[in-house]
Image (cartoon, grey):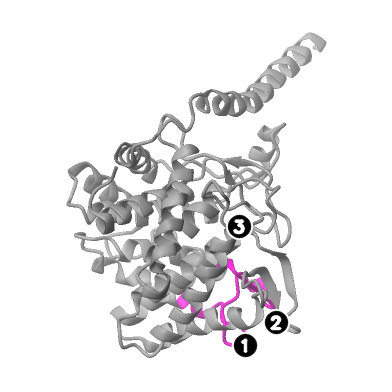
Amino acid sequence: MLEIIAIVFIVVTIIIVAIDIMPISKDWLSRIYIGRYTNKQEWNQSITQVGVKWLNHTPKIKVTDNTRLIAIDMLKGNYSKSVIQHWQEASLLLGLNECLKNGADKELIIGIEQFLNAKFDTSGNWKNVPSNIDSAILAYGVMKLEGINTERFKPAYDSTWSLIQSHLGEDGTVQYRKFMKNYRYVDTIGFICPFLVSYGLKYNKPECVELAVKQIEQYQQNGMLDEHYIPSHAYHLDNSMPLGLYGWGRGLGWLAIGLIDAWHELPEGNEYKPRLEHFVTRFAKSILTFQGKDGNWNWTVTRRETRADSSATATLGWFLLQASQIEEISEECIEGTERAIQYLMKVTRRNGAVDFSQGDTKDIGVYSMLFNVLPFTQGFCIRIINHYKHSRVVLK
């Protein structure tokens, strides 16, 4: 009996050690010859191939920062959560949609249709109905697909709007989670505002557009550091007390996505367009002052000593590229975008996966210290370089 127990113990130990060692070894090997891309066209092709592959086989994103005994986290269900996958998949869709604008690629179309068939039933509803507002950015990614009949998924869009409504707080803005009703997170702006504007305009629901603008403007009023104009991670409704860091890199990214995509969706002449444009201009000037000499933004943008974060760099690079449409800031925004692209090329593995993105945040003020591959970053890199290709005509 003791021999059997000893054998079982040894086997379990070997399995646990193997599960711990394999990711570390894989990362080490994958980073050999990292950053060898110098040609934007080649980089675009490489990162896009990875994006197409990941759309239907999206890598699981770790919730935990543990690098030891991760098998235990897997057994407890603490290794990854499906809600995190929504914004990974959304980003890949948004990036690949920019590829569709160059013309329909058969393999890409097949991959997207496969993804849609996995997410929606034949009546256009979600197969697995989301319960968190993170899913709104995925619905937005589906709505934006070019050359694909996405009108068939209107029941899922309607469901997403109902989900957002169910998260409305007493102040008339949207809660990140129902059990945290007195907090407003910067993440929420990125999750819901582009969807609300797009859905509201498409289906003639002005209340959706109004809610998106209110969510943004309330954060502008309560969650921004006045002089430097960067957001806190969250704020408390009772006293507008800022919570978490001012200058969390991906927090700036969430604000950037929500703000710039909402602004871009609004047509010229819309009453809210100039109000958001003023915010875009001021925020663009602010983030440019925090961009590093290599074109990156750090995970804490206010500290040069902290690590560079590819997810912050990709999302803020996208913001600047879109903001360059504003004549007042066009030149510096294009320059900032190009520097961000150069940095992102330098942190791309030889297989086309963009590396060194900060891991999932644990709580307000509790940030991951792991930096690795993130499909969310991959999608925004694809989105940037393909939109840049449209606007600059020739990639060199």
Residue 60 falls left or right of residue 75: left
The answer to whether the residue labelled 2 contacts the one labelled 1, judged by CB atoms less than 8 Å apart, is yes
The amino acid type, in three-letter code, at marker 2 is Leu
> Dot 2: what SS?
loop
Task: Provide residue 389's location: percent of width, then percent of height.
Answer: 28, 52
Which of the labelled discs sits on residue 249, or is there none?
A: 3
Q: Does the CB distance between marks 3 and 2 fall below 8 Å?
A: no
The N terminus appears in which quarter of the rendering?
Answer: top right
Residue 307: name its quadrant.
top right
> Callout 3, which amino acid?
Gly
Residue located beneath label 1 in the image? 171
Reading the chain from its start, which is encountered first: label 3 or label 2? 2
| Residue under the point 34% across and 75% down | 265
Residue 146 as seen in the image, left or right of residue 277: left
Residue under label 2: 237
Image coordinates of residue 127 in percent, x first then y, are 39, 58
Q: Is residue 51 visible?
A: yes
Disc 3 and disc 2: Cα gap in Å? 23 Å
Residue 104 falls within the magenta-colored stretch: no
* Residues drawn in magenta: 162-187
Secondary structure of residue under mark 1: loop
Marks 2 and 1, how far apart at CA: 8 Å
Q: Earlier in the sequence, mark 2 or mark 1?
A: 1
Q: CA distance from mark 1 to mark 3?
A: 27 Å
Q: Nearer the viewer, mark 3 or mark 2?
A: 3
Q: Is residue 158 visible?
A: no
